[in-house]
Amino acid sequence: MNILLISTNRNASPAPVFPLGACLIAEAADRAGHKATLLDLMFEKDPARAVSKALKRCRYDAVGLSVRNIDNNSMQEPAYYIGDLASLVRRIKAGTDAPVILGGAALSIMPQEILRATGATCAVRGSGTAVFPRLLDRLSSGQPLDDLSGIIVQERGEGTRVAADPATFSGGNTPDYSRWIDVNAYRSRLATVPIQTKLGCGFKCVYCTYPTIEGEGRFLQDPGITANSVQKLAMSGFRDFEFVDSVFNAPPEHALALCDALARKQLPTRFQSMDVNPLFLNDELLFAMERAGFSGMGMTVESASDPVLSGLRKGFTAAHVHKAAETVRRHNVPCLWIFMFGGPGETEETVQETLRFAEKEIRPADAAFFTIGIRIYPGTGLETIARKQGVLSLAPAEMLAPVFYTSPGVDPWRMEQQVRNSVQRHMNFLCADSLGFPYLPAFHQLGCRMGLTTPLWRYTRHIRRGLRFFGMDE
Ligand code: B12
């Protein structure tokens, strides 16, 4: 079959992200004997026109859309992407009779709602590398779709989520990017190359969708295979890699083995992961990360206060957070501390406790990133808590446009003031809405031209001082 795949993500904040999922699906279709073309909308000036042009150029038998984001998870500056997606589907249907198939992380979270909002033919829930070729076979032979595992057809229930097929995962989890997308456009904006080293998440954080997207079981990629993939990409000029696993250092021995395998390769590369868990952080792992060439890590502690950590079911305590800060201070890997204010159990005192931690324990050269309010997704523990507390009354089907939780134990306005005061006084602190500020994409391009390397948050205090000098950082 002749397949058009469209990567619909146009969000360039904090940086454009390589469409890993879309490239993997294109390669899976290709391997199955179909002819796949990938249209990446990330840098298209007029995406609607680009789609119409593609549909006029060629006759396609199926159109697949990769949908990464529903929204931007920000209560302060919410962005919602499904409205644009619906317009895009309408435009595609006006230009072709081919079935429109949706897939991507967003579909794993709320498949029926997105199908209903867009009017697409069907959706794939979970990994598509094994399912998409099967779906194409059914389409080409005119067989029904709705009994195929992982496929959701409008208004016929939630469908089963398909776990990724380990066989497909271990064989082909780093696509040949240059074949599918404009890699230079990504690199010139300091985008990192995503690398997946495992699948699944066994943690029970109340707000999180990762177990829904990837499954609760765990499949670990052989570190030697990952290191070989990185080496291959390094040989074609890629330098900055980012591990996109749910949690990088769980299980810790897998992360350690991976760092050792990468260090042995002696590559001119830099690595990052935005999801490091304080529970499994120790000197041994940090030494290994230094040897492998880590240029940054995100420590997703969310809070430094026990009532909130327990309310969020993070599985660690404030003592672990403090210990992680001591460990980080003994090493050279730059660290972005990530906090989420307003979770179950949050009060004015717990906000103060977390801010005190950030102000005292985080090195000035490191950075802290604060979000306020937590996006509630259907099916999560947070949804149950919010309903019990009377914070949420919308039906699950109405939760596609973002809805946020803040603890009834704290006045949201007061909490925001507390956090903003701290950000005002500490130039290495960032709020979620700083990422939405209009200069960020330009900063990335400028940074790249100046020879700066990612992650740019390492320069937070310098950038903010510069902005403050020009009256642009209040
Ligand atoms: C790593 C990650 C990041 C990294 C990305 C680094 C990088 N270089 O890529 C960083 C930290 C930068 C990041 C940022 C953001 N992220 Co993020 N991120 C993730 C994470 C953990 C993994 C994504 C990934 O690469 N997965 C691996 C690839 C292979 O999987 P995949 O793309 O989903 O593709 C598979 C399937 O979906 C399917 N598939 C994909 N496309 C298609 C198409 C078709 C036709 C078919 C059939 C199947 C199919 O098959 C693929 C292969 O198995 C996910 C959560 C998760 N566990 O998925 C969140 C996630 C995608 N992020 C999310 C969000 C919201 C964001 C931000 C908006 C947050 C913010 N406020 O800054 C930004 C947006 C960035 C941007 N420019 O778009 C949400 C999106 C859902 C939502 N709520 O809207 C997720 C799901 C997390 C969540 N909160 O639930 N993110």
Image (cartoon, grey):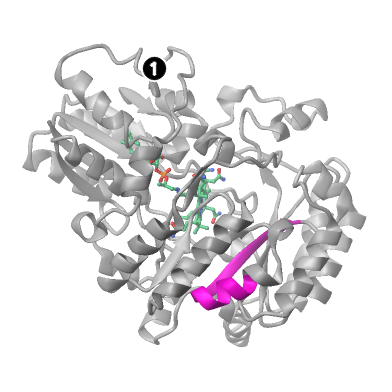
Q: Is residue 387 visible?
A: yes
Q: Is residue 135 magenta?
A: no
Q: How many marks?
A: 1
- Specify the amino acid type for callout 1: Gln
Per the image, is 287 magenta?
yes
Q: Nearer the viewer, residue 148 or 86?
A: 148
Left or right placement of residue 271 versus residue 313 in this view: left
Quarter residue 142 falls in: top left
Q: Position of residue 197 (x, y in %)?
A: 46, 53
In-image side of 32 versus 164 (left or right): left
Please say if 248 is above or below 22.
Answer: below
**Which quadrant is home to the N terminus?**
top left
Asked where in the image residue 325 lies, by quadrant, the reply is bottom right
| Residue lying at 21% horizontally and 47% vertically, measured from the top left | 38
Q: Tell whether circle 1 marks a residue whose Cβ is less than 8 angstroms from ligand 1.
A: no
Relative vertical location of residue 362 with respect to residue 200 in this rendering, above or below: below
Check the picture and name the quadrant holding the C terminus.
Answer: bottom right
Q: Could you tell whether 175 is left or right of 33 in the image?
A: right
Give the x, y percent position of residue 318.
84, 58
Can residue 339 be seen in this snapshot?
A: no
SS of the residue under disc 1: loop
Q: Who is closer to the viewer here, 221 or 92? A: 221
The residue singled out by tag 1 in the image is 154
x and y, in percent, of residue 448 in the image: 38, 80
The correct choice, above or below, for 461 with respect to 421 in the image is: below
Q: Position of residue 368 (x, y in %)?
A: 68, 69
The magenta segment is: 286-302
Q: Residue at position x 88%, y 48% from top?
A: 307
**Of residues 288 and 54, the one drawn nearer to the viewer in this rendering:** 288
